[in-house]
Amino acid sequence: MFYPYFDPTYIILLPAILFALFAQSMVQTTFNKYQRVRAYSGMTGAMVARNLLNSHGLSNVRIEMTNRRLGDHYDPRSKVLRLSPEVYQSTSIAALGVAAHETGHALQHANEYIPLNVRNSLVPAANLGSTLAMPLFFIGLIFAQQSLMQIGIIAFSAAVLFQVVTLPVEFNASRRALVMLKDSGYLVNNEVRQAKSVLTAAALTYVAATAVAVMHLIRLLVLRGMRRDD
């Protein structure tokens, strides 16, 4: 059961980890590429986000600049859209795509988009599961306590479910972003396709995170089965 030098169940994770590395490389490469391409509208990410929010009746949503690179996000609790400097201040196609994507999340919140509400409701369970699942499972594994392993698996399942529900939320925000940018004229012609490339690359990172989480869960189930057979 115990492998001092190699645990063969890590092989289960390898394809998902390689995919995650590929996705991270893709998002960095694609964002950097289109960060150097100025949008014809000449508007910054912050300006586009502000105009889109206002046009959808969300003038109460504040926009702030965060110092984290690619740390762009919408905070539904404080109704604040936070943009990184390379998005907030830039007039690039990449910046406009990301700014509109985060604006899409604000619209989801305002419209009570069901997958977003489900994801938000899962946050406490997912955070608890991410923190406690592995310690509980491996304590159970070491001391042959099937009940602890089962609790660990159930706890980790909440984190996996959170990742799965995140996918439609992110895909929908990107669809909204592209429609808004095109319909409002902030991106024209080929620029829409280029922005789509940025958002598609970003979406790959969420798919990869989900794949890693699912493979981790499968690995836990395999380890439990192996311990049961000892």
Image: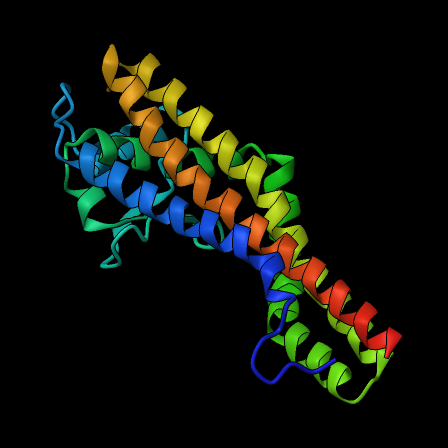
Q: Which part of the image, by quadrant, shows the N terminus?
A: bottom right
Above or below for 35 versus 221: above
Q: Residue at x 14, y 28 (%)?
A: 37
Viewer-nearest residue: 135 or 12: 12
Viewer-nearest residue: 114 or 13: 13
In-image side of 58 versus 213 (left or right): left
Q: Residue at x 40, y 32 (%)?
A: 200
> Quick check: can you spot residue 137?
yes
Which quarter of the figure has residue 6? Answer: bottom right
Above or below for 110 versus 129: above
- x then y, percent, for residue 124: 63, 64
Which quarter of the figure has residue 23? Answer: top left
Q: Residue at x 46, y 25 (%)?
A: 175
- x then y, percent, for residue 85: 18, 49
In-image side of 24 versus 36 (left or right): right
Q: Residue at x 35, y 25 (%)?
A: 196
- x then y, percent, for residue 18: 46, 51
Viewer-nearest residue: 94 or 104: 94
Above or below for 85 versus 193: below
In-image side of 63 versus 9 (left or right): left
